[in-house]
Amino acid sequence: DIVMTQSPDSLAVSLGERATIYCKSNQSLLYSSNNKNHLAWYQQKPGQPPKLLIYWASTRQSGVPDRFSGSGSETDFTLTISGLQAEDVAVYYCQQYYKTSYTFGQGTKLEIK
Amino acid sequence: QVQLLQSGAEVKEPGASVKVSCKASGHSLTSFTLHWVRRAPGQSLEWMGWIIAGNDNTRYSQKFQDRVTITRDTSAKIVYMELSSLRPEDTGVYYCAKSDSGHYFDYWGQGTPVTVSS
């Protein structure tokens, strides 16, 4: 299985500041046939299912605020939240869908400083 | 708007089986792939398997393939996930989730808590 490693495990950021979460895979997620990185980001709040934020590494899901952005390629990816809001407190996961078994990072818990 | 509605919480003894359902509305069940994902306490999310609702093809995670079965009832727009030989470490919340051609999960069910305890 592809191993996904996120950093940091937890993060405290002041309101209005930028939060950056990293995700690294142990093999490239760039699929040559479509030239796309098979990497998604999710947000999960307590008692709720995960919510898709970003797919193809950088495409924002419809309805997701534009303060959420994704970047990176092959094995190294970043989720950036610009201008942190109180409602952004959650656990964030990256997920590879390059090949089965699809795997997730261990999660990054984001809190307000 | 797609909605996935899952069955309610379950409590099972070790060695038993559990069958969780996921009912789709707002979308044809034959036009997407339906996945099952688990989150055990203190753990990350784990992909268990999928069913391609249009042709009944299934694929399972190697970790679960000996114990999990995913089936569908197209007329009722319901997909089922059955997990057998339950162990206490199978305790967690089980989610169904939909994907289209790219296997990122754009819609999720609300989750079904499963507790395995004697």
Image (cartoon, coloured by chain):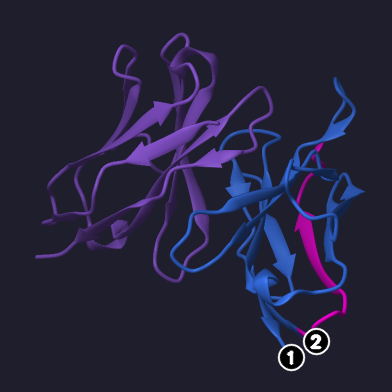
Q: Earlier in the sequence, mark 1 or mark 2?
A: 2
- The one nearer the camera, B93 or B26, is B26
Which part of the image, by quadrant, shows the C terminus of chain A?
A: bottom right
Q: Measured along the vertical axis of the image, is residue B79 above or below residue A15?
A: above
Which disc is residue A14 wearing?
A: 2
How packed is label 2: few (under 14 Cα within 10 Å), some, or many (20 or more)? Answer: some
**Chain B as rendered: colour:** purple
Circles 1, 2 touching at the beta carbon (< 8 Å) = yes
Q: The numbered mark 2 sits on a residue in which chain?
A: A
**Chain A as rendered: colour:** blue
Residue at image coords 48%, 25%: B26
The picture places residue B15, in percent across and down from the top left corner, at: 13, 50
Query: Distance of mark 1 from mark 2, alpha carbons?
Result: 5 Å
At label 2, the amino acid type is: Ser
Same subunit under labels 1 and 2? yes
Asked whether residue B44 appears in the rendered view, the answer is yes
Which disc is residue A92 wearing?
A: none
Residue at image coords 60%, 51%: A51
* Residue assigned mark 1: A113
SS category of the residue bearing label 2: loop
Relative to B117, A8 lies left or right: right
Q: Measured along the vertical axis of the image, is residue B49 above or below residue A51?
A: above
Q: The numbered mark 1 sits on a residue in which chain?
A: A
At label 1, the amino acid type is: Lys
Q: Measured along the vertical axis of the image, is residue B109 above or below residue B54?
A: below
Residue range corresponding to the magenta coloring: A13-30
Magenta stretch: includes residue A22: yes
The picture places residue B95, in percent across and down from the top left corner, at: 42, 46
Residue at image coords 66%, 46%: A2
- The one nearer the camera, A10 or A5, is A10
